[in-house]
Every structure is written in C-alpha cells, then in structure tokens.
Image (cartoon, helix red, strand yellow):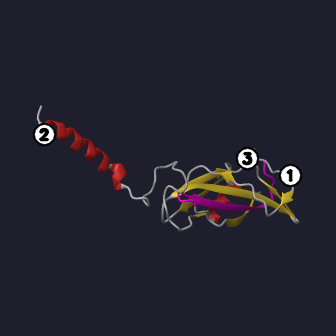
Amino acid sequence: MSIRSLLLPACVVALAFTAGPAAAQSPTDNPVPGAQPGACTDTNRPSSTFTRGAARRAATGRRHVLRGTARDAGCGVDRVMIAVTRKQGRVCRHLTSAKKLGRRTSCAKRHWLPVAGTSRWSFRLPKRLEGHTYVVRTRALDFSGNLQRAHARRLKLR
C-alpha cells in the first residue's frame, strides 16, 4: 500500500467538510424554513399588512377569508400572527383560538392567533361573528427574532 492511497481518502474527507452547502452559508444567509429564531442575524423588523380591499372582501365575501402579505429585508419571515378585537366601551372581546369571542377583558392584552402562510398569508374569520366593527392587528416575526410593531385596521362585518 502506498502513501498516496492512504492520503487520498483523508483529502476527500477534508474537502467534504470544508466545501458544500453548509460551508457556503454565512450566518446571515436565509435559514431553512422552521429554523429557530436567532439562527440568522439582522436588525431590520419585518412588516405585515393587508389592504382595505382585502378587508372589504373578507367582510362581504361568503368565505370570510382575510388575506395579506409579509416581508423582511434580512433573514426572512418566520411567522405571522393576527389579533381580532371587538371594542365595547372601555373593554374588549378578543377572538380566541376556538374562533369565538372571549370574555370581556382589558384592551391592552391581545390574543395573537397564527395565520396560514408567511410571505402571503390568509386567515379564515368565523362566519358566526356578529356584524360589528372589529380591530384587526397583524404582526410578523423574522428568523432573527425581530418582531414587528402591530399593524392595525378596522374591519366592519355585516
């Protein structure tokens, strides 16, 4: 057995560990979906929104689906959340995960619910919500853990 045959496998192994997709990624590259927050570093907050037209279609449509978008300039959007609130005087009723209005509580405490999707998201509003005006807030979280300040719009259901 020659020295060359012994060294070749060690070189191949060394190249396998230094080259390839894992070595090509820097700490600021977009991580794979489902990565833990903090896996990427950036200081930019993500943004999420929905348009007045989307709110109007959700309020008057048969399916009551609210659609919106989210984006992030750095690491990418990890998740988007929504809070639906009906304000009655000084107290509020928040939409719960059971898709019902909860009991009357402080308006400062919001109940955040997950939406389907990230950069293009949708949320199905329950059809049995009463015809009132609701405040809908959205916020996005990126892979580096930056949280958007809540974006709010009014939604009048009929």
User: Residue at image x 53%, y 59%?
Assistant: 144
Mark sitting earlier along the chain (2/1): 2
> What is the spatial separation of the Cα atoms under label 2 and label 1, in whole angstroms?
76 Å
Q: Does the magenta portion include 42? A: no
Query: Residue at label 2?
Result: 4
User: Residue at image x 50%, y 59%?
Assistant: 76
Amino acid type of the residue that numbered disc 1 sits on in the rendered structure: Arg
Label 3's element? loop
- Tell which residue pokes out farthest to the left in this image: 2
Determine whether, in the image, residue 37 is placed left or right of residue 130: left
Closer to the eye: label 2 or 1: 2
Dot label at residue 103: 1
Out of 61 and 4, give the one closest to the viewer: 4
Q: Quadrant of residue 51?
A: bottom right
Amino acid type of the residue that numbered disc 2 sits on in the rendered structure: Arg
Q: Position of residue 69 (x, y in %)?
A: 56, 60
Amino acid type of the residue that numbered disc 3 sits on in the rendered structure: Ser
Out of 15 and 133, give the one closest to the viewer: 15
Mark 2–mark 3 contact, CB under 8 Å? no
User: Residue at image x 56%, y 67%?
Assistant: 45
Number of other residues with Cα within 10 Å of mark 2, as a class: few under 14, some 14 to 19, many 20 or more:
few
In the rendered structure, which segment of residues is drawn in magenta?
126-145
Q: Does the magenta portion include 131? A: yes
Dot label at residue 97: 3
> What is the spatial separation of the Cα atoms under label 2 and label 3, in whole angstroms?
65 Å
Out of 119 and 124, give the one closest to the viewer: 119
